[in-house]
Amino acid sequence: MKPATPHRTVLARAMPRATALVGDITAGTVSTLVMLCYAMSLGTLIFSADLARYAELGVPTALVSCIVTAFVIALTSSMRMNIGGPDSNATAFLVGVAAGVASSVRANGGTPTVILLTVLVAIALCSLVTGLILFAIGSSKRSRSLQFLPYPVMGGFLAGTGYLLIAGAFRVLTGVALDWHTLPRLVQLHWLAWAPALFVGALATILARTWRHSAALPITLVIGIVLFYVLLRVAGISPDDARNMGLLLQHVPMHALHIPELHLPSSLAHGEIDWRAIVAHLPETLIVTSVSAITIIMNSTAMGAATGQDIDLNREMRAAGLANIASGLFGGMVGYQSYNRSMLNARAGATSRAAGVFAALACLFVLIASPDLVSLFPVPVLVGMQIYMGLRLMMDWLVGAYRKLTWHEYLLVPLILAVIAFYGVIAGVVAGVVAACVTFALLYGRAGCVRMEFDGRTRTSNVERSIEETRLLIDRGDEICGVCLQGFLFFGSANSMLQRIRERIRSHGPRPVRYVVLDFAWTNGMDASVSLAFVKLRQACGAIGADLVLTALPRNSRALLTRTGALSLGLREFDTLDAGLEWIEAQQLAALTRAPEPCVPAGDFRAMLAPHFTARALEGLAGLLDVCDIGAGEALFRRGDAGDALYIVEAGRVTVSLPLADGRSVRLRSFGPGTIIGEMAVYTNAPRSADVVADEPARLRRLTLAGLRTLELDDPLTAQEWHRFVVKMMASRLAVADEALRAAS
């Protein structure tokens, strides 16, 4: 085999690059055609009705957005084949901004020149504001938070967008706003005004539902334009006559500098811009920003799923922000990443960012070399595309969403749509947000804030007590009425919690409730109205002589209850639920020692073990038990020590803790008088698994492993009683654990 020559090696390396470049140029050419179609359709949509005199200005405004947005996003997006530009969602709301600003200027007595200049500045400022906010969201890495927007509210906004598109199409055809009284205007139109529009709308709908290809829209536009000119020739109407009939856009120079009325620097100097009108419609500008941000999230997520690429949403937000800032500085409209155009770019053969850059430069060439091309664009084709996009959005959210949403979620969609149709975008936004908040409050309040309910039988502290004390506490477990709360507490959930506790207090067992425990470990906040529920609960507890115990209050919740005075009502507060239960158990046991009921006092070793051993066995066992006194903080044994002895706590208390790698330790359980500790290591012949340290001066009785073996050999009956005692202790622990598990399940 002959070795490859250097010439062949270079050629072999260049071929893949050339192939990729051809693919990028081909995809860029296709994207250019699509971007021009979008620029002509969306651009002329902005300047309609009262602004129809300058309809041609909408196309360069949209083209500027196509050029700048596509260029910036191609270079900065996390997806190499991404294509950006103006989109129907934001444009529908931008139409409302332009129309509202024009109406305000007219109401203020502005001339047509002032109206036009103010609208152009408003469009540019809308892009700047949107760009700054999007860039701030991406820079602060808050893009994911936008995904928490309620799904039905977003659906209502998009359905309202569809209505605005259809209303805009009606306004383009008739020159008046859509209303019940203006609907008869449709029958007065020339058939060339509505026939191509219906054909384009129907064809786009059919292709979207059957073919589902990204090239469906540009193909529909091409067919619609060809059909219009064929029908125009059949009808014997010249282009100039069609333009006079409103079927073609007016022939006006496209360069802003060629329009005598547009001298922006001098206009700014002479105060020919109505800034009051722009400020009055600033909320609508923020809606455009919100719609843009949501659409970017949706489009980027869909592109990532379709291509299998990891999409950085924060980077996409920053890219769209920079693109809109640049577009606003050049007078362009709002634009961002487009799913359809990006997917078409990828399917057309794009392999790198060069395709998007080529498309942007090609659109720039068209804007400079052929600015009058837009005057040949048929108005009915534009109307047909508006009808298609509007009906698609309305069908998706009024029909398609019915199967996806619950009935109360679905009702938000037509509600928001109706409010937008009758009262405007701002009212629709407010209605949607208010309705979503009310729905959330009702549903969340119904779901409740109670994570788990418990009493003294199903939940105990981590203090190990003697068998007798454990039995007494379980017997009086119905004196405790406890709930573990969760989530964010507000008036709805707090009232439902209050009602449940009142019902439990009324339906108590043989003994009345003496302790009401609220654990806040799983909560993440509360509003001020919750303090009123605590006041009512404290009054209910006072009426029956019960203590109200609060545990694990978060810092912000505690500060709120302190400000409202709820914590000054004689409540008991503890850092953890375990600490609160330990205090309650101590109170119950202290009451039992004062009562005539029997309760073995701590420190009487023989009396403590007498219920479990015969007198002979207890005498023999006492001879094998060594007394072990340790001070507070002193270790009985450490983790890893040999398991050569077990201990009976006679007085005081010791705590089992697990040491961690960072030097801290976690408390596992505490042991009081009458309990056994260290038996697991002895019976399993394993090293100690945790540390045991005295909480206070303690006395213990130690039975060594050697002593236990001697007992088993010399006195089997006593050894048998000893093992039975150990089993009873372990069974008592398991019984408590079983009740806790049953309550949690």
Image: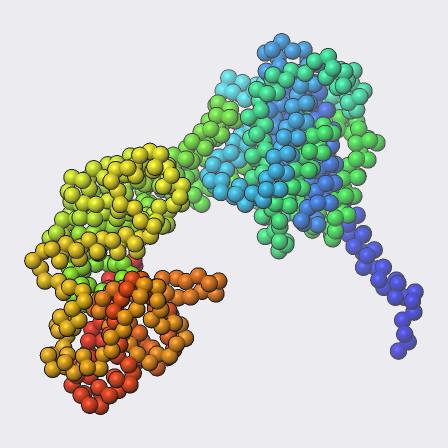
- Is residue 553 toward the left or the right of residue 65 in the image? left
Farthest residue to the left: give it.
596
Is residue 15 visible to us here? yes
Q: Nearer the viewer, residue 610 or 438?
A: 610
Q: Nearer the viewer, residue 117 or 317?
A: 317
Query: Which part of the image, by quadrant, shows the N terminus?
Result: bottom right
Q: Which residue appears at 24% of the width and 36% of the height? A: 536
Is residue 383 visible to us here? no
Q: Percent from the top left, x then y, of residue 683?
A: 30, 80
Vertical side of 500 occupied by 729: above or below: below
Vertical side of 76 occupied by 351: above or below: below
Q: Nearer the viewer, residue 273 or 524?
A: 524
Q: Percent from the top left, x then y, of residue 612?
A: 14, 74
Q: Which residue appears at 46% of the width and 63% of the height? A: 663
Q: Which residue appears at 30% of the width and 79% of the height? A: 645
Vertical side of 446 occupied by 667: above or below: below
Number of labelled discs?
A: 0
- Is residue 417 toward the left or the right of residue 6 in the image? left
Name the quadrant containing residue 470.
Answer: bottom left
Q: Nearer the viewer, residue 603 or 366?
A: 603
Query: Which part of the image, by quadrant, shows the C terminus?
Result: bottom left
Name the quadrant containing residue 390.
Answer: top right
Q: Which residue appears at 49% of the width and 40% of the height? A: 149
- Is residue 606 toward the left or the right of residue 114 in the image? left
Q: Percent from the top left, x then y, of residue 543?
A: 16, 39
Q: Percent from the top left, x then y, of residue 266?
A: 76, 15
